[in-house]
Image (tube, rainbow, N blue to C red):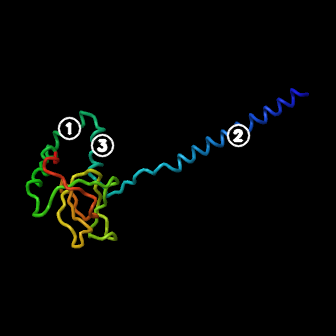
Amino acid sequence: MVTQILKYIFGFILAMAILIGGGFAMALYFMNRVSAPPPKPIYANDNPVVKAQAPKSQTSKTNQVSLEESSPTPQKSPKPEESAQSLPPGAYKARVTWKQGLRLRKEPTADSERTGGVAFNQKVIVLEESSDKDWQKIRLENGEQEGWVKSGNVQKIDEQDDT
């Protein structure tokens, strides 16, 4: 009789331990799933250059050779070097310091239409500042996009750091 009571008590304690442990494991799992940040959304007008380069690395060498033979113009792109020598007066080179990247806007207001985006650590050319010094007009180094961003999110770079 005593052994049956001990078996009952041991079974009850074991069942409670399994339920509590399982509940704790499920709580940890769901807390980790809920607290993970979502992936960064990709918009149709954000960095079209990145989308064009991604499939190129996935193609085979034979496809790359045929692409290079058919269109030699992409290899002759000294645009950044030419634009570096011919900066407009008062313009300077800078790098994006905001970790999430920046949104380019059509006008120097937060309500203005978005025209594109600039990635973190990407080189840009600061063309001008707004009259209130809150916004800066920038152009991507390759000259593809131009727009306004909030001031303080880019840092001027020296010519030595330009490599």
Of callouts 2 and 3, which one flags the residue occurring earlier in the amino acid sequence? Answer: 2
- Amino acid at dot 3: Pro
**Considering depth in this image, is 69 or 112 the residue closer to the camera?**
112
Of callouts 3 and 1, which one flags the residue occurring earlier in the amino acid sequence? Answer: 3
Report crowding for label 3: few under 14, some 14 to 19, many 20 or more residues within 10 A (C-alpha): few
Give the labeled residue for mark 1: 66
Of callouts 1 and 2, which one flags the residue occurring earlier in the amino acid sequence? Answer: 2
Quadrant in which residue 70 is drawn: top left
- Amino acid at dot 2: Leu
Mark 3 secondary-structure assignment: helix
Mark carried by residue 19: 2
Quadrant in which residue 66 is drawn: top left
Give the labeled residue for mark 3: 55
Report crowding for label 1: few under 14, some 14 to 19, many 20 or more residues within 10 A (C-alpha): few
**Residue 69, position as x, y percentages in the image:** 16, 39
- Residue extending furthest toward the bottom: 131
